[in-house]
């Protein structure tokens, strides 16, 4: 029953967003097919709804958020008949097929979608580390507080929070699973936007290949089962490119404004999304100057930049207000930042730089090979494979005939994206926006002329083979999640077996006083804890990133922060002799008493009381 409620709640939010987006489309006077309207309206509408939720949270009005959402829904109902007609039209088109091959492709996409849907409908557990640490945990803290406030122990709480605001709404409505489902639908919109871009601007026959190429990437499939935010960055990047191409084809201001809004929303999902804004401005200016009319559209470029920055500004202004740094905790040497130091900034940069296999020119040339065969160097969660899509695409990209400025601009945009990613933190999931553009590129090139017939067949084989492998990587998660999703297992039973910190946090919820405060060592995942807590490992904040002379000084610092208990995850916390010596000494000397679990000293996840 809860699964059905969560699914319906997420669908209702998506429908509400589509209605809001339809109203925005009327203001922009932008045209499009039924499928284009549905995708663009839903995506832009989610961004607008997120901004409304942010405003409510900033005004400390989260206690009346359900009322605000009902008002948005009521206003959106004006556009509901048109949205419903478009949805029915698209559904009819999808169930019709013109050949056996199109039927098989449709079935493959459906199977992939269902395989990802099952774990997406399960409560967030072991694989959702960042979700339980801050994507969902910070919104829960905001809800408990009644609105947004400064969280001194987590720099992550000052990141752009477009998706997290949508998660806030679902959590406030009583469903963490619905929050995960919002991200799932964003993944669906991302795949649909890629197919839409190919169909509208290049070759409709290439759209299925683009959809399969993107959907089948194992890391994309995995992301759709979580409450992360990378799929949203990809969606708004592809959407910004699509609307820009609309403008370059038919220079109507509504398309350019829509593209700017989408670019601003990309920058509202995460800071790396800021790169989308200058890249598209450069594309716009260069393309218009290269046209027959030799138009230098610097005014339109300024307009685009202004609108995009206006859309994403709330998140960066919030960061300035709370920390003094618009991109906190990055660029500390330039902007500084509250509760941060040069040493913390340096260590954080080192952690970000550990991903990948180098930043020199040789490493860049080897990137396709390394991403394919050494993918574990580019992620911090086991099994997030990329597959061979980048490696097999290279020959095609090099020998392609870029007959149109659209295709040439798309290729240049893709390369620029990869260069920016390569220069920053080389985490594979940050490549999702680039994968969306790459899927478009390879599908269009493979179908642009007959000399690529053999390459087209080979590419289809690779895409389908990768998708099957991606499905294989999802099966364990789907099998583990199925009992709780289909009601054969309770949430407590599922989480007790699938999340190492859950039982300890449930014990604390049931046994610790309401005013208890817990320090986390070796862990940051506090979503399921209903008591005040803080991240206490060095590197997260200035409170605990300091040198203590003795265990008594450590205990004194903990007490000064009103800490009453500790939760230590010994799976992650350093072993004796490798760090955390003062904590071990405090335990050995009895300054910390183990209260959970009883009779199991140094259990994998233990709770201690400070004496």
Image (cartoon, rainbow, N blue to C red):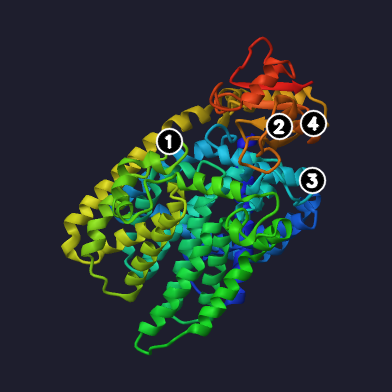
Q: Secondary structure at mark 3?
A: helix
Question: Residue 519 got which mark?
Answer: 2
The alpha-carbon separation of the residues under discs 3 and 1 comes to 37 Å
Describe residue 374's horizontal placement relative to residue 132 as left or right. Answer: left
Residue of label 1:
474
Where residue 353 sits in the image (x, y, percent)? 46, 48
Nearest the eye: 176 or 260: 260
In the image as oriented, which residue stretches furthest toward the top? 599
Are the two marked residues, 3 and 1, in contact with CB atoms closer than 8 angstroms?
A: no
At a point 45% along the width and 69% down the height, the residue shown is: 279
The alpha-carbon separation of the residues under discs 4 and 3 comes to 23 Å
Q: Residues within 10 Å of mark 1 (few under 14, many from 20)?
A: many
At a point 53% along the width and 26% down the height, the residue shown is: 578
Q: Secondary structure at mark 4?
A: helix
**Image height of 388 relative to 17, above or below:** above
Quarter of the N terminus within the rendering: top right
Question: Residue 21 got which mark?
Answer: none
Which is in the foreground here, disc 2 or disc 3?
Answer: 2
At a point 33% along the width and 64% down the height, the residue shown is: 204
The alpha-carbon separation of the residues under discs 2 and 1 comes to 34 Å
Which is in the foreground here, disc 4 or disc 1?
Answer: 4
In the image as oriented, which residue stretches furthest toward the bottom? 293
Residue of label 3:
145
């Amino acid at each position: 029953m809860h699964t059905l409620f969560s699914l319906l709640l997420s669908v209702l939010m998506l429908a509400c967003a589509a209605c809001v987006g339809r109203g925005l489309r009327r203001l922009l006077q932008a045209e499009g097919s039924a499928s284009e309207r549905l995708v663009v309206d839903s995506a832009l509408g989610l961004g607008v709804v997120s901004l409304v939720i942010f405003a409510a949270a900033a005004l400390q009005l989260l206690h009346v958020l359900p009322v605000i959402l009902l008002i948005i829904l009521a206003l959106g109902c004006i556009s509901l008949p048109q949205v419903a007609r478009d949805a029915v039209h698209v559904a009819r088109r999808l169930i019709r097929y013109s050949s056996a091959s199109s039927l098989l492709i449709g079935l493959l996409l459906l199977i992939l979608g269902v395989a990802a849907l099952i774990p997406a409908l399960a409560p967030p557990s072991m694989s959702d580390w960042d979700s339980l640490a801050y994507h969902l945990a910070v919104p829960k803290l905001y809800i408990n507080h009644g609105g947004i406030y400064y969280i001194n122990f987590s720099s992550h709480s000052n990141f752009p929070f477009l998706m997290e605001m949508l998660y806030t709404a679902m959590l406030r409505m009583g469903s963490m699973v619905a929050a995960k489902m919002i991200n799932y639908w964003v993944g669906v919109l991302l795949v649909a936007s890629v197919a839409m871009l190919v169909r509208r601007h290049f070759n409709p026959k290439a759209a299925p290949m683009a959809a399969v190429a993107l959907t089948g990437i194992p890391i994309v499939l995995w992301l759709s089962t979580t409450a992360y935010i990378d799929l949203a960055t990809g969606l708004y990047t592809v959407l910004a490119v699509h609307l820009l191409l609309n403008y370059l084809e038919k220079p109507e201001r509504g398309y350019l404004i829509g593209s700017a809004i989408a670019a601003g929303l990309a920058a509202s999902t995460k800071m790396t999304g800021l790169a989308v804004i200058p890249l598209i401005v450069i594309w716009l200016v260069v393309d218009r100057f290269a046209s027959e009319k030799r138009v230098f559209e610097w005014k339109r470029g300024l307009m685009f930049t202004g609108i995009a920055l206006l859309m994403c500004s709330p998140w960066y202004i919030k960061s300035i207000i709370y920390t003094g740094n618009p991109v906190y905790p990055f660029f500390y040497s330039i902007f500084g930042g509250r509760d941060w130091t040069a040493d913390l900034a340096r260590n954080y940069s080192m952690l970000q730089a550990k991903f990948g296999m180098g930043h020199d020119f040789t490493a860049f040339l080897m990137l396709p090979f390394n991403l394919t065969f050494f993918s574990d160097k580019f992620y911090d969660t086991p099994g997030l494979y990329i597959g061979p899509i980048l490696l097999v695409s290279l020959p095609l990209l090099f020998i392609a005939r870029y007959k149109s400025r659209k295709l040439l601009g798309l290729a240049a945009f893709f390369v620029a994206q990869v260069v920016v990613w390569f220069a920053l933190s080389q985490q594979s999931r940050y490549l999702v926006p680039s994968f969306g553009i790459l899927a478009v590129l390879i599908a269009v090139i493979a179908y642009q002329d007959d000399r690529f017939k053999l390459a087209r067949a080979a590419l289809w084989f690779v895409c389908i083979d990768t998708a099957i492998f991606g499905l294989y990587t999802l099966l364990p998660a789907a099998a583990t999640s199925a009992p709780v999703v289909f009601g054969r297992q309770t949430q407590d039973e599922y989480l007790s077996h699938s999340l190492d910190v859950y039982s300890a946090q449930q014990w604390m919820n049931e046994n610790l006083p309401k005013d208890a405060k817990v320090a986390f060592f070796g862990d940051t995942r506090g979503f399921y804890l209903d008591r005040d807590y803080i991240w206490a490992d060095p590197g997260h904040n200035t409170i605990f990133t300091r040198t203590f002379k003795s265990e008594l000084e450590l205990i004194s610092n903990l007490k000064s922060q009103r800490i009453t208990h500790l939760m230590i995850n010994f799976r992650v916390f350093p072993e004796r002799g490798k760090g955390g010596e003062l904590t071990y000494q405090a335990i050995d000397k009895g300054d910390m008493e183990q209260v959970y679990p009883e009779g199991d000293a140094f259990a994998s996840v233990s709770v201690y009381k400070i004496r």
